[in-house]
Every structure is written in C-alpha cells, then in structure tokens.
Amino acid sequence: MRYNKVRFKINIQGAPVVNDMVVVKRSKDIVVIEGDMKSKWCVYIGYVSGNYGNHNPSILIDATNRSLHLHPNKTGVTEIELVDFAGWSIWCVNVSRYSICACLIKETNERK
C-alpha cells in the first residue's frame, strides 16, 4: 500500500526525533496521520490547534527516562508543525513505542 507523505516542520527540536509522516486515511473532513519516530518510547504532551486564524496545527512530544535514540545535542520538547493542514484541529494523538498517530478534523462553519 502506498501512503502520501505529510510535509512537516520542526519548530522546536528537542530530544525526540521524527523520521517521516504519512497520511493513513483521509476523507473530506477527517485525516489520520502516522509518523515514524527515530526516538523510541516518547510521550505526547500537547498540541497547538490550527483552527484559529488558519494556523497550522502542531504536536508536542517529549522524552522520558526510558526513551531511546534521542537527539544527541538537544533536550526538552519537540514541536512538529503539520504544514499542509492550516485550519484543521487535532482531535486525538497517540504515541506508541515506534510511532505517533494523530486524527485531525477540518473545522467548518457548522462546527465553529
């Protein structure tokens, strides 16, 4: 199966390192994204919503004492900005050992 790559920008490079992100499933108003992590056993700590003023949503992840393969020179939080999803909101995020998965919803006038 072929997946479409997701363009992302690292606004803050902390300890966790992301390899790549792809769209797993997409409809008109919902998209599921999965990211392959170079770092293992990281944790989700928050997000920045994109639905206010058509900003891009961002996902914030951090390391714990059991995280592996972290950035050699950085510490703290990594912010992953999803540059192709201006105006979308992050509905949920899950971080597992090897990956990060996010479900985004497109904000419409009916939902605002």
Image (cartoon, helix red, strand yellow):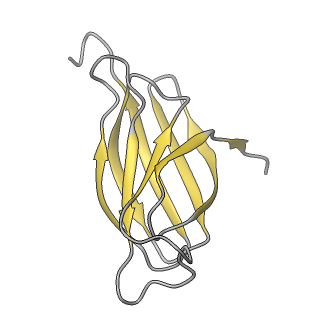
Q: Residue furthest top?
A: 109
Residue shown at 61% from the left, 71% from the top: 38
* Occupied quadrant, residue 34: bottom right
Answer with left or right where residue 90 lies relative to residue 99. Answer: left
Residue shown at 79% from the left, 47% from the top: 2
Where does the C terminus fall, quadrant-wise? top left
Q: Position of residue 93 (x, y in %)?
A: 37, 55
Residue shown at 55% from the left, 29% from the top: 84
* Occupied quadrant, residue 25: top right
Q: Position of residue 50 (x, y in %)?
A: 35, 29
Q: 57 or 104: nearer the eye?
A: 57
Q: Position of residue 12 (x, y in %)?
A: 44, 52
In the rendered view, tell whether residue 1 sits above or below residue 73.
above
Q: How many marks?
A: 0
Residue shown at 37% from the left, 18% from the top: 54
Q: Residue furthest front?
A: 73
Q: 47 or 14: nearer the eye?
A: 14
Q: Position of residue 64 (x, y in %)?
A: 35, 81
Q: Residue furthest right?
A: 2
Q: Residue furthest bottom?
A: 66
Answer with left or right where residue 13 lies relative to residue 2. Answer: left
* Occupied quadrant, residue 110: top left
In the rendered view, tell whether residue 60 sits above or below residue 87.
below
